[in-house]
Image (cartoon, helix red, strand yellow):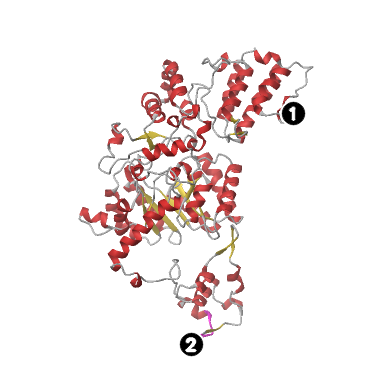
Amino acid sequence: MITGVMLTAANGQVVAAISNAGYHVEISCGGMHTEDDMVTKLYALADLLELGRGITLNCIFSNPKQWDFQLQVLLRLRREGLPIVGLSISGDIPSFDKALEIINALHDTGIRHVSFKPNTVRAIRHVINIAQASNNFYIVLQWTGDQGGGHHSFEGFYQPILETYGAIRACENIVLIAGSGFGNIESSLSYMTGDWSVSFESAPMPFDGIMFELSDIAAQEAVAALAVKKLIAVAPGVSETEWQQTYDGTSNNAIPATIDNGELDHMLMIRYTAFVRDMYRDILSQPRNQQLELLLAHKDKIISRLNNDYMRPWFGQKIDGRVADLGQMTYVEVISRAVELMYDKHQKRWIHKSYFRLVVDFINRSERQLCTPDQSAPLTALLDKVEPVCYVDVVSEIYPEFKTRLLSSEDVQFFVYLCKRQGQKPPPFVPVLDADFGDLLLKDTVFQPEYLELANGQNSQRIGVQQSHDAAQYLTRTDEPVKGIIDGVYQGHIAALLRQLHSGDEASVPVVEYIGAEFDSANDIISGLTSMNETSTERVFRLPNTAKQLPNIDSWLQALAGPRKSWLRALLTAPVIAQKSRFVDNYVRRMLRARP
């Protein structure tokens, strides 16, 4: 599977390519800031999927504002027929009661599985407790350990699993996934066979699957800029024995850096990463009530590094290019700078639709503040008729004083408020050094590689590139389809397992019609039948004459389907069927329900 924390796992093209290739993938919802964003992107993804493919969402539980609306949208879209099959919960694990509440809601809506990402032995046992209380629902336990840059855990990979493996396997509804910088056959095969644990003088402990943290951003389908893909392709990576160097700062390849949710993740060691590391070490790791004083004491240096090393430049700039504060800028300069940073003049589109609202709201406020009572307010109507790059000309023609009047203190505060307003994409600049500097700096930064042309200076060194330190060594091309990347490992696993378990003889491999739930005994429905006769060619049931005595529909259809996995069993036991890009209730089950 491909985890949903990778930056292009929010891009429908890449997610669809992975899913259509036959692999499990999560779509990251971290960059979906509004309900409209989420609905639009998920419907677009559904239309890219082949018939029968499902969607698993990765939502951040530790971001309560985002989590609350995303869970409700997820449930609503599934009820509308969108092929949502799973939810991966990242950032934190809910309490026992909250987890059961979420699982019940997912189950009732027809969603099949939920994933958790524990970071300690205690958290693993917490997931086990949840699974034991939800034995009719699949729980996916994703374990990465500390080699993921601290994003999920600082604990070593092996010991927590050695301690808890028996308890995990006692829960038949837990699917155990390993993820720790895999990228080729050799690095991952022992986790599928279980041989990794033999070196610890333990019995083989196979995982059910592996989670790739190789960056799908470098795949052919990824929309990341070519310069970003090349950065990944030339990154040498480190071996398993060298990865701890990334924590002490001696690695020149990838280091753990703070990302937008406040957690650590491995990033390529470029100018962006060095700046974030220095800001966090010197300022953002200090008590919040001390940060503003430190920011102001190093203001000139911070602004210089924002403009030279970071994706988000300092907003304040005079018309001649000199650095300024907001209060030193005219209204025209603010409007011009905002359009410059938030509108893509080459593609003639706003980077995000919420940026149009930000600019227009500021212009409307400015007009109300500065126009006289006898003047009308025509700007709003005019802005819809001209290109954003012409806003300054339109504003200057109607209100010439906008070119010379400096922002009032109230309008400075209003502009900063607009930049921090909830429910919009964080702006691509830093407007002010204040107590919220950390949020303005880091929020929504992991998605920038898809829009390098809009980053500060279009320089790939100035953007954050998530990349597992050890998986980096396996990515050497920028033009390989994502299917080819994963197929190479998958087919290698099959060949190795065929040699190991069947001496290379394909004919000795057991064949099943499909992989699905095991047969449930139908003994409990016999009392609901008057008689049942079975021959080599048919099975005849005689049903009671009253509806009250009939067997329930699940047991009845289990009996009709029989114990062998076949097309008939799949048809009668599947709760939904796929129609175009949607799931609908399996009406065949309704048609074949027991009747007196």
Q: Is residue 36 in view from this perspective?
A: yes
Q: Position of residue 178 (x, y in %)?
A: 35, 52
Q: Residue at x 31, y 62 (%)?
A: 497
- Give the residue at mark 2: 535
Nearer the observer, 100 or 32: 32
**Mark 2 Cα shell of 10 Å, populated few (<14), some (14-19), many (≥20):** few
Badge 2 amino acid = Thr
Which image quarter: residue 467? top left
Give x and y (percent) for residue 415: 59, 23
Please name the amino acid that badge 1 sits on. Ala
How would you rate the neighbour count of disc 1 (Cα within 10 Å): few for under 14, some for 14-19, many for 20 or more?
Answer: few
Q: Position of residue 402 (x, y in %)?
A: 67, 16
Residue 176 visible within the image: no
* Residue bounds of the magenta highlight: 528-537
Cα distance between the residues tagged 1 and 2? 79 Å
Quadrant into which the C terminus falls:
bottom right
Asked if residue 544 is positioned above or below residue 366 in the image, the reply reads: below
Query: Residue 516 at x, y = what percent?
Result: 45, 66
Q: Residue under circle 1?
A: 381
In the orientation shown, which residue stands out farthest toward the top? 404
Q: Along the horizontal axis of the image, is 547 left or right of 313?
A: right
- Residue at figure coordinates x 59%, y 43% from the top left: 35
Q: What residue is drawn where x is 37% and y is 23%?
A: 282
Dot 1: element: helix
Q: Secondary structure at mark 2?
A: loop
Residue contact between numbered discs 1 and 2, judged by CB atoms under 8 Å = no
Q: Is residue 223 magenta?
A: no
Is residue 378 positioned above or below 547 on the image?
A: above
Looking at the image, the residue that sits furthest to the right is 374
Q: Indicate the quadrant where residue 378 lies.
A: top right
Check if residue 534 falls in the magenta segment: yes
